[in-house]
């Protein structure tokens, strides 16, 4: 893995054991998945499709129990999709810049911790918007493009073991204003708010490496590091 460049998606194959390891390298992703799910309302019709773009190991799945969605996960890496399938996700091997799904098919599109990894942000936003039906909901979380976010996510995060080394390329981090503008081009009015892990949760995890039942992501006004977004696609 040391020979790979930053943000190389093949790293997820080497890190596949971390997806569901309690207290492991993807611990905060569990907290983020729970926070993302809290923004997703119950399905309004039987068989409603939720597209989980860049689903990884399927961490969103347990938090959707009882909400009534048909949960389809799209990801480049089959190692993550195999684990997602074991947690009830319908796996689809594909790229978020060219989703192999019909236009207007999804009631909800979830894009968790993926937008800071894509090299074609306009193309990705276009695809997320394309598969969303009129009136449908997009829910996302990502990393802001600021000096503070680069320090927290890369410099300090990698040294403290909060983020696996090399997983992020700070050149791909996304400012909220840019993301809002990209979605607006496709008829999705996005609103954002900041997010952060609870201090007690972080301390317990870093000091004790306990499993993900204790950590939690909470909303904040500042968006300087992490932020969440929700938006509805205009009715045609």
Image: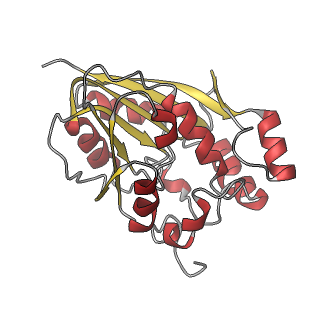
Q: In this view, does 210 lie to the left or right of 12?
A: right
Q: In this view, does 151 lie above or below 132?
A: below
- Determine the residue located farthest toward the right in the rendered image: 207
Q: Which of the 4 quarters of the picture holds residue 122?
A: top left
Q: Position of residue 132 (x, y in %)?
A: 24, 33
Residue drawn 80% across the image and 53% down it: 209
Q: Which of the 4 quarters of the picture holds residue 130?
A: top left
- Determine the residue located farthest toward the bottom in the rendered image: 3
Q: Nearer the viewer, residue 140 or 181?
A: 140
Q: Is residue 108 left or right of residue 145?
A: left
Residue drawn 18% across the image and 36% down it: 105
Count of picture labels: 0
Q: Is residue 106 left or right of residue 215?
A: left
Residue drawn 41% across the image and 63% down it: 82
Q: Position of residue 66 (x, y in %)?
A: 44, 28
Q: Which of the 4 quarters of the picture holds residue 52?
A: top left
On the rendered image, what quadrant is the N terminus found in? Answer: bottom right
Q: Is residue 230 left or right of residue 162?
A: left
């Amino acid at each position: 893995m040391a020979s790979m460049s930053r943000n190389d998606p093949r790293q997820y194959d080497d890190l596949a054991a971390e997806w569901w390891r309690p207290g492991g390298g993807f611990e905060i992703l569990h907290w983020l998945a729970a926070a993302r799910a809290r923004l997703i309302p119950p399905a309004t019709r039987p068989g409603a499709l939720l597209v989980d773009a860049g689903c990884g190991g399927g961490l969103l799945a347990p938090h959707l129990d009882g909400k009534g969605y048909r949960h389809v996960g799209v990801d480049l890496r089959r190692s993550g999709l195999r684990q997602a399938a074991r947690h009830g996700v319908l796996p689809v091997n594909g790229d978020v810049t060219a989703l192999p799904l019909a236009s207007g098919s999804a009631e909800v599109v979830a894009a968790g911790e993926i937008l800071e990894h894509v090299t074609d942000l306009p193309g990705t936003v276009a695809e997320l918007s394309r598969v969303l039906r009129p009136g449908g909901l997009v829910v996302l979380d990502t990393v802001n493009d600021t000096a503070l976010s680069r320090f927290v996510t890369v410099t300090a995060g990698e040294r403290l073991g909060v983020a696996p080394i090399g997983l992020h390329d700070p050149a791909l981090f996304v400012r909220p204003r840019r993301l809002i503008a990209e979605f607006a081009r496709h008829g999705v009015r996005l609103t954002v708010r900041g997010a952060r892990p609870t201090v007690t949760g972080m301390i317990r995890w870093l000091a004790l490496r306990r499993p993900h039942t204790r950590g939690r992501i909470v909303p904040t006004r500042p968006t300087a590091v992490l932020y969440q977004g929700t938006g509805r696609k205009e009715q045609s």
